[in-house]
Image (spheres, grey):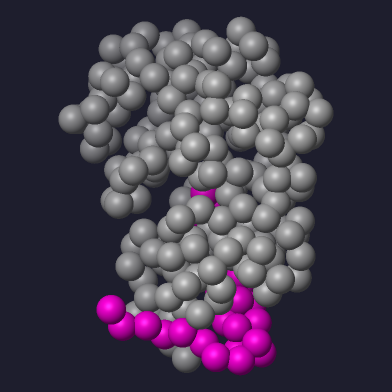
């Protein structure tokens, strides 16, 4: 496999600056606001569930947008929607094979968030007392959320939930290795200027997009 790996530290920092200048992360590049409010956090979590184990970003982004645009942008609204209605939207936007399963899962997720946290993931964070390991554990207790979903969600919100940083999912790390930017989230944090910076979240999201969309050829030296 061809590689475009950098060599010196200065080269790596220069590439990081260019990558961050191109994008504001993953979710925001596809039209999802990443802000610390209940609806935004819920939409990012739904996107993470749809992204799990898929190599086709459109099969995650398009149905996630469609669910939001149908008016189910919050846990309370998603929970009130009929499972059949959610499944119909998912089928129409590229998830025909698993529409019924996903519709049920997203409904159960929404109901659990309403019941446990009044529909507000910030209450989950508060219940964990901002302890990253506990936040991960509580997230993983939610329907449809496994370790991969937790990683994808925290990748997006780490600038908001600063105690969780640095976070880099397997896609971002694959791109980082191929581009010579390091092998860990800590390596990327060093290049981005710190583990709690918004710049790190943008970098990690951009790297994930490069790998998912196989855009390595666009990274010119």
Residue 16 colored in magenta in the image: yes
Q: Is residue 103 above or below residue 213?
A: above
Q: Residue placed at 30% from the left, 52% from the top? A: 55
Q: Residue placed at 56% from the left, 56% from the top? A: 168
Residue 130 colored in magenta in the image: no
**Left or right, residue 192 beside residue 217:** right
Residue 188 position by quadrant: bottom right
The answer to whether residue 76 is visible is no
Residue 58: image x %, image y %? 32, 48
Residue 217: image x %, image y %? 35, 80
Residue 162: image x %, image y %? 76, 47
Q: Is residue 107 above or below residue 202?
A: above
* 77 or 216: nearer the viewer: 216
| Magenta region | 1-28
Residue 38 position by quadrant: top right
Residue 113: image x %, image y %? 59, 16
């Amino acid at each position: 496999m061809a590689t475009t790996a950098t060599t010196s530290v200065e080269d790596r920092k220069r590439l990081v600056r260019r990558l961050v200048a191109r994008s504001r992360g993953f979710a925001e590049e596809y039209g999802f606001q990443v802000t610390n409010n209940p609806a935004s956090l819920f939409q990012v979590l739904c996107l993470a569930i749809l992204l799990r184990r898929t190599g086709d970003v459109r099969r995650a982004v398009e149905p996630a947008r469609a669910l939001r645009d149908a008016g189910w942008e919050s846990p309370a609204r998603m929970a009130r929607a009929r499972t059949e209605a959610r499944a119909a939207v998912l089928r129409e936007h590229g998830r025909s094979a698993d529409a019924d399963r996903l519709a049920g899962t997203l409904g159960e997720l929404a109901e659990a968030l309403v019941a446990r946290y009044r529909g507000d993931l910030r209450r989950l964070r508060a219940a964990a007392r901002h302890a990253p390991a506990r936040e991960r554990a509580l997230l993983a207790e939610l329907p449809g959320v496994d370790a991969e979903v937790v990683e994808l969600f925290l990748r997006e919100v780490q600038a908001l939930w600063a105690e969780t940083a640095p976070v880099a999912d397997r896609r971002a790390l694959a791109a980082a290795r191929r581009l010579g930017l390091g092998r860990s989230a800590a390596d990327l944090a060093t290049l981005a200027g710190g583990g709690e910076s918004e710049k790190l979240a943008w970098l990690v999201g951009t790297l994930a997009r490069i790998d998912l969309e196989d855009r390595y050829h666009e990274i010119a030296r």
